[in-house]
Image: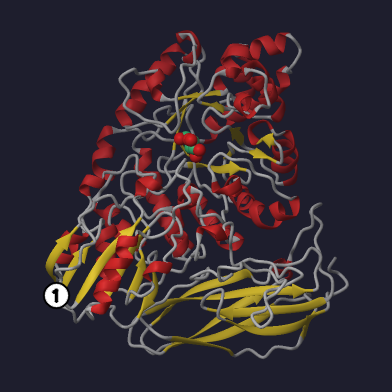
Amino acid sequence: MNIKDLLNQMTIQEKLGQMTQLPPHMFIEASKTTVYGDMRDLELKKQEYLLAGSVLGIKDADEMIRVQNIILKHSRLKIPALFMADIIHGYETIFPIPLAQAASFNPNLTKEMNAIAAVESSTAGIHVTFAPMVDLSRDARWGRVMEGYGEDPLLNEKMTKAAVDGYHYGNPKEVGYLASCFKHFAGYGASEAGRDYNTVDMSYERFYNIYQPSYQMAIDAGSEMCMLAFNTFNGIPATINRKLTQEILKKQMGFDGVIISDFDALHQTVAHGAARDDERAAELGLHAGLMIEMGSSTYLTYGKKLLNAGKITLKQIDDAVYKILALKEHLGLFDDPYKGASTSREKTLVRSEKHLNAAKDLSLESPVLLKNNGVLPLNKMKKIALVGPFSKSQALLGAWRWHGQSSQNQTYAQTLSKVLTLVSVSKSYDVSHIKDVDAVILTTGESDYDTGESKSKVGIDIDLQASEAIKTLHKNNIPTIVLVHGGRPLNLTSITAADAILYTWFLGSRHAEVITHILLGNVSPSGKLPMSLPRHVGQYPMSYHDFNTGRPFNPHNSEYTTKYLDLDLTPLYPFGYGLTYGDTAVALISELKNHWDGSSPLTLIFEIENKSNFVIKEVLQIYMNMHPSIPVRPVKKLIHFKKQLLNPFEKVLVEFSISINDLIIYDEDKNQYFDPSTLTLMYGFNSKDTKEIIIDWRPHHDIK
Ligand code: BGC
């Protein structure tokens, strides 16, 4: 298809139609598809909305084919619509929520999950996913932390790359390849007070060092689209923020794809107080280079008027439409507008046995074991009581479950009763009648309905009834294993008396089976916390990635040092923390000089030893600090990690290559600093318990 020729034949209204994205119910009244947010009456005439260039949130193949037929029938130039949807952690086969995927510290698993999600969603003719969400966040009050990869820039980058690579399976023109739209640009995860949609105000130093890397990684991995965030970014709604879109996203970061708004966000610039009305919103959107407006209709309604009045240029419209048409060509839609959509493929591929088994296998590394005084694994235990609200629950899919079917999920009561004697099962926390059992499994946490978009909250403590139950069991000498469910870090301070604590997150279609496997010791837990767990909600925003301040906390003389009067400064469990059923030791075995000039990489070789008879996977983590440095550095910054399989009593060598890229820090003008200083490398199995290597950093003269 010659895109330029096509563009030249289009009328202004046809072009503005391409820049508009509408939900399927605009085309088929009976459509049952739900989309996030409130759908206003857009007051478009039928001839206008039939011009829409893309559709969001399609339900299945039948619906896609019907909508595409309607659009093609009315399209003078036979331009097919693009179909986009939120395929976030699976289509119908649901995988762990992204935060739980990050907890695996194994990006390859995410790649495999997304490849399956791409194949399944292709059966409904979905061409683009609104994913990955790569908004780094350090605030558990924000419900959308479940959709992201946690608090650390490096973990976010690695997960982002894997997520995009997974969706981009095979050739873009072939069925099974899902184009990706990374989101939400920029800084959505830093909304003030963790309140969704709230203001984001951020220094560029912080943006470049912490928030930008994962967006950049999505671009480098070939993400075709970028969704702008709902929030203001340094005073201007991201949707119309020219500095963000033109200078940062396009020029500085090299993004050359399609830019889309979030749902209704162009219209919402009026509520923000930035645009007087929809007409002005359209003008500002076009000036900012916003190419598709999702769920609102300001371009179609006012675009032509603005053009005639000379307030926008034809080039602004043409540049946007060219990119949209080029994306359709890239995905092969001009050759096959129904690409992939097939009710028969749906029957064989979606929620197939193979995919459901993969959901189990790929979820095994996400749960995080926080405490275990020997009660786990449960292999020798016979008689178990199961209590708490998740005991018989099927609601284990996680927030982006819209194609998923929780009614098909197994419950803990079902999976555990197959392998143990469940002497009692109760949805309540009442443990007063429990006796003659080897252990109690107590399920607690938040419901998956309490997580995700618009689910900000300040109550992140565990239900008091759970801690009362644990105290009672403790008094009666009954071992207690707690299974915590959550889409965010929860405050576990009140339940640390339990004998074992397993953070299960929401694992999707095979949640209960996966946890049962782990409880029985068929597989050792190997997850690590992608966000520190707090002692109190008042600590937010928080992360391990803290700065020293000029008055670091001093436990021996704490007056006038940085601290809380009434709370320990540290997290309850730090970033990167998680136990296995084994026992591991690590030793640095490479000989290091005490200085380094960066002209060649620094090789670190470690020996990790599994001192147990369990097969385990451990994550060796390397952190760094440089002192002095301007800008100042966090006390610890993760620069490498490696997940290593260890057979019983095995010793394995693990090698890392440290390069000057690991030392980069940007100032607010994006200059890099490599001044001579003391480089401290730290290694360990979590961010807190680390050993140090101190190196004199004297940069080679070629390094600026
Ligand atoms: C969310 C986006 C999502 C879009 C379409 C919005 O409310 O913020 O992340 O992609 O809806 O469903």
Front one among 518 and 327: 518
Front one among 517 and 428: 428
Rendered-image quadrant of the N terminus: top right
Rendered-image quadrant of the C terminus: bottom right
309 w.r.t. 266: above or below: above
**Circle 1 Cα neighbour tier, 10 Å, few/some/many (<14 / 14–19 / ≥20):** some
Give the left or right position of residue 615, taking residue 237 as reference: left
Label 1 belongs to which residue?
435
Is residue 598 something one can see in this rendering? yes
285 w.r.t. 645: above or below: above
In what element is the residue under mark 1? Answer: loop
Give the left or right position of residue 529, taking residue 445 as reference: right
411 w.r.t. 335: above or below: below
- When asked about the image quadrant of residue 381, the answer is bottom left
Q: Amino acid at mark 1?
A: Lys
Front one among 423 and 665: 423
Is residue 172 something one can see in this rendering? no
10 w.r.t. 564: above or below: above
Q: Residue at x 26, y 44 (%)?
A: 405
Front one among 182 and 681: 681
